[in-house]
Amino acid sequence: MITTDILIIGAGPTGLFAVFEAGLLKLKCHIIDALPQPGGQLAELYPKKPIFDIPGYPEVLAGDLVTNLMEQIKQFQPGFTLGETAETIEKLEDGSFVVTTNEGTKHHAKAIAIAGGLGTFEPRKPILKDLEFYEKEDRGVDYFVKDPEKYRGKKVVISGGGDSALDWSIFLSNVASSVTLVHRRNEFRGALDSVDKVQELKQEGKIKLITPAEVVGFKGSERIEAVDIEINGARMNVETDYFIPLFGLTPKLGAIANWGLEIEKNAIKVNNALDYQTNIDGIYAIGDVNTYPGKLKLILCGFHEATLMCQSVYNRLNPGKKYVLKYTTVSGVDGFDGTRKEAEKAVVKSID
């Protein structure tokens, strides 16, 4: 059983920043996320796309923002349960909660903060015969690259035309024995430097590029041995150990929708006049997953909501104890790992 003060469901930017605000209040956090790495949409869908509305950053790449947030919360030592989704919740007599994931991992928390962005992300799957058979028990179809070493020395076919398909083709070109990138168009929707890099690796023979084309079938009885590719009305067969379709993610509220929360248009209603708490005492919703009058789905709004949520949790867990808000420029930041960040002390010196 994993125990924590605040269990955060969703490792996107709002969930990550909540760890920092909780840490200032000496509250420990653990995060559950269905994706194999922190960052939510920023890490999975557009890590190389610039964001222009983060205060203090005229421009910052989505992936860099995630890196910075992870660095910011490092000293508060959050725990992570990645690649799993929150399935069931049980409220105990003392007001705390037990949340169990689809893999059976149990988490005991004094408060819950749902920061799931647009919900649980599920991969967009191609419509192919026998797909369900090959996606089970490591038979050859993967939708996420959780461990690149899994593909070392293997033949890999990647399908897709966005940043994920480009970036993983580039990365695995130095890991797999062969990488074939298939896209239904000649044009790619990705960072220009990634497109140029794929072009360079194609010329070096490290990536085989097949466009405009799409995977239309599989061969192999026990697991994938090859994929059938349709190109200009003709069929070709490419031997492979793994097929990785990277067509983006579909957001769904998932099992959280069955927790008894008040839902409106696939979003969780909260009390924005106070602390972004839901209709269930002790459960909050922050970021894009919530809704209230005047709601704006912006990262900076999620940061604000996370801050007020943490203050509310502190008051809930420490009834009657007054917390005096101090600016970090004055108080400094003490990490759970023993580190301390503080402004340089002013020098006291008389002038003759």
Image (cartoon, rainbow, N blue to C red):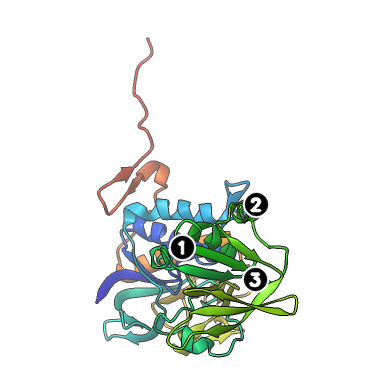
Q: Residue furthest top?
A: 352
The front one of 204 and 167 is 204
Where is 330 relative to 55, above or below? above
Q: Residue furthest right?
A: 232
Give the label on residue 294, or none. 3
The crowding category of the residue bearing disc 2, from other C-alpha atoms within 10 Å (few below 14, some 14 to 19, many at least 20), is: few
Upstream in sequence: badge 3 or badge 2? 2
User: Is residue 123 visible in this depiction of the protein?
Assistant: no
The x, y position of residue 336, in whole percent, is: 27, 54
Disc 3 or disc 1, which is closer to the eye?
1
The x, y position of residue 13, in whole percent, is: 50, 61
The front one of 214 and 316 is 214
The crowding category of the residue bearing disc 3, from other C-alpha atoms within 10 Å (few below 14, some 14 to 19, many at least 20), is: few
Q: Is residue 174 left or right of residue 318?
A: right
Q: Residue at x 73, y 65 (%)?
A: 186
The answer to whether the residues at label 2 and label 1 have Cβ atoms under 8 Å apart is no
Tell me the quarter of the image containing the N terminus.
Answer: bottom left
Disc 2 or disc 1, which is closer to the eye?
1
The front one of 212 and 117 is 212
Query: Which residue is disc 1 drawn over?
Result: 176
Where is 225 relative to 158, above or below? below
Q: Residue at x 46, y 71 (%)?
A: 35
Which amino acid does the dot numbered 1 rest on?
Answer: Ala
Query: Which residue is disc 2 drawn over?
Result: 196
Secondary structure found at label 1? loop
Give the label on residue 139, or none. none
How many angstroms separate mark 3 from mark 2 (CA)?
42 Å
